[in-house]
């Protein structure tokens, strides 16, 4: 009889262990999620200093609040929970900087490589929905991505993208109309 090697704990399990004060579990969670998180944040911000601050604040919040993660019971994932914290910290960083200057250069630049969430979304939604998303103008897609995928409010999306709230509302409406037409 062959023995299977023990299965590595998933991120939800690591988060539960982190909630009990397990530093090794936290370090493993960080090792698994921080490269992905840094890349994903760079899709939203090109300022390395802001990214470093957001990463530090995010993992400090994860360590302190791991016990509040409801997990699969609430229909969420540990990685999604970490991403939500990171997005909120990124918005907070923009707000702090907005009092002193304009958003850092590169916030509005789109990257040539698709973001991980775009690839994941394309792989999980039907062909027609994926095609409709890819056919959206980039400025509409980024608003839809922030609001629908990242779960941000109009105000948070406006801050993240450096746009007036009215522009975000207009682009969100145009994106919904374009999606509806493409799928009909």
Image: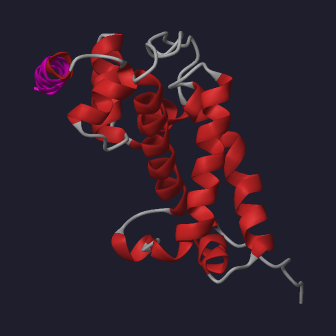
Q: Left or right: 171 with respect to 134?
A: left
Q: Residue at x 46, y 15 (%)?
A: 101
Q: Residue at x 28, y 39 (%)?
A: 148
Residue 18 in picture, x, y percent from top left? 66, 74
Q: Main secondary structure of the magenta part?
A: helix
Is 173 one of the magenta-colored residues? Answer: yes
Q: Is the residue 93 above or below the residue 135 in the image? A: below
Q: Left or right: 12 with respect to 85?
A: right
Q: Left or right: 115 with respect to 143?
A: right
Is 131 one of the magenta-colored residues? Answer: no
* Whether residue 116 can be seen here: yes
Residue 54 in picture, x, y percent from top left? 58, 40
Observer-nearest of 131 and 115: 115
Which of the 4 image quarters holds residue 40?
Answer: top right
Observer-nearest of 110 and 18: 18
Q: Left or right: 161 with respect to 109?
A: left
Give the magenta part as a residue range.
169-184
Residue 161 in picture, x, y percent from top left? 37, 21
Observer-nearest of 40 and 101: 101
Q: Is the residue 182 above or below the residue 152 in the image? A: above
Visual colour scheme: secondary structure
Q: Is the residue 42 above or below the residue 29 in the image? A: above
């Amino acid at each position: 009889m062959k023995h299977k090697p023990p299965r590595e704990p998933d991120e939800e399990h690591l988060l539960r262990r982190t909630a009990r004060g397990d530093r090794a579990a936290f370090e493993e969670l960080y090792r698994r999620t921080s490269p992905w998180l840094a890349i994903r944040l760079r899709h939203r911000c090109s300022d390395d200093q802001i990214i470093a601050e957001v990463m530090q604040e995010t993992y400090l919040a994860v360590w302190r609040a791991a016990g509040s993660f409801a997990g699969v019971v609430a229909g969420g994932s540990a990685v999604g929970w970490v991403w939500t914290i990171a997005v909120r910290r990124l918005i907070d960083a923009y707000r702090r900087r907005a009092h002193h200057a304009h958003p850092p250069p590169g916030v509005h630049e789109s990257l040539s490589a698709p973001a991980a969430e775009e690839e994941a979304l394309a792989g999980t939604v039907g062909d027609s929905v994926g095609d409709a998303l890819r056919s959206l103008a980039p400025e509409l897609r980024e608003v839809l991505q922030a609001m629908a995928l990242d779960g941000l409010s109009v105000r948070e999306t406006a801050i993240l993208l450096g746009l007036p709230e009215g522009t975000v509302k207009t682009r969100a409406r145009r994106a919904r109309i374009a999606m509806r037409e493409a799928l009909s």
